[in-house]
Image (cartoon, grey):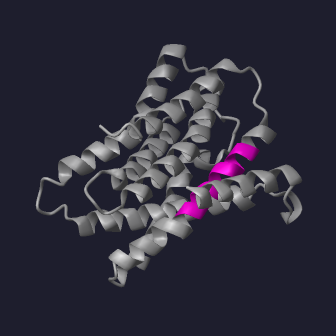
Amino acid sequence: MDYRYGLLFLLPFIGGLFAMRISHVNKDILKLFLAFSGAFLFSITLIDILPSLYQVHTEWNVGLFILAGFFFQIVLESFTKGIEHGHLHHLRHRNKLPLTIVIGLCIHSFIEGMPLSNIGILSEAQRSNLIYGVALHEAPAAFTLITLLRQSKTSTPNTISILLFYSGMSLFGIYSSNLLSQFPFFTTSVLQNILALVVGTFLHISTTILFENSENHSFSRFKLIAIGIGVALALFI
């Protein structure tokens, strides 16, 4: 198995463990990490993945799937409450497990993992970039999820179980793609459509991360630095 896949599990798991260890969430630091990961994800999507997708997948419906992915993410956030881009909410029922949020996040992570399989729709460099982008943005999502679970008074064993399950969902998406590729209906064209769907979700998530938390539609100096580092890293790799 590709060692890079380990990042898809390791970074969210570390993000979740960190949330279990700290007593107070510093939202400013979380926003800076989100700005960095959002800029990186946005950059690799525009610079690398999107041009390649249009070059290989020339049918008109590639744009349709990108658009569908963008709006699918909006629908999904009605369940996840924006955990994907670091929204911290106070639960209405503090002693109740936020099951819809957990399920929504797992669906999101599973779909992101599907195009990362080694079936051949991405070059090795593109697959690496996408793995890094997914892993980086799943880490703060896991951090926020575990913070919510702590608010809901979820027991430590259940919290760890949910974290393990969530951290493995991208890998499960990869495994499912490899498994489905053995069937005639699951062609590379189908997987390319799934990639286009994921690109749409990336565009929504990354732009939301970059712009929605800016007070008075302005960026702080530190946020600009975090964004610059994310863009520079994407250009470098």
Residue 113 location, x and y as percent?
Answer: 38, 48
Residue 160 location, x and y as percent?
Answer: 49, 21
Asked if one can make out residue 104 in the rendered structure from this viewpoint, the answer is yes
Asked whether 225 or 96 is in front, the reply is: 225
State left or right for residue 47 relative to residue 179.
right
Q: Which residues are magenta?
A: 32-44
Q: Residue 232, located in which quarter of the rendered image? A: bottom right
- Main SS of the magenta segment? helix
**Residue at the spot 26% in from the left edge and 46% down from the top edge:** 176
**Residue at the spot 71% in from the left edge and 59% down from the top edge:** 210
Asked whether 61 or 32 is in front, the reply is: 32
Asked whether 142 or 5 is in front, the reply is: 5
**Residue at the spot 44% in from the left edge and 46% down from the top edge:** 109
Residue 37 location, x and y as percent?
Answer: 63, 50
78 drawn magenta: no
Q: Residue 183, located in which quarter of the rendered image? A: bottom left
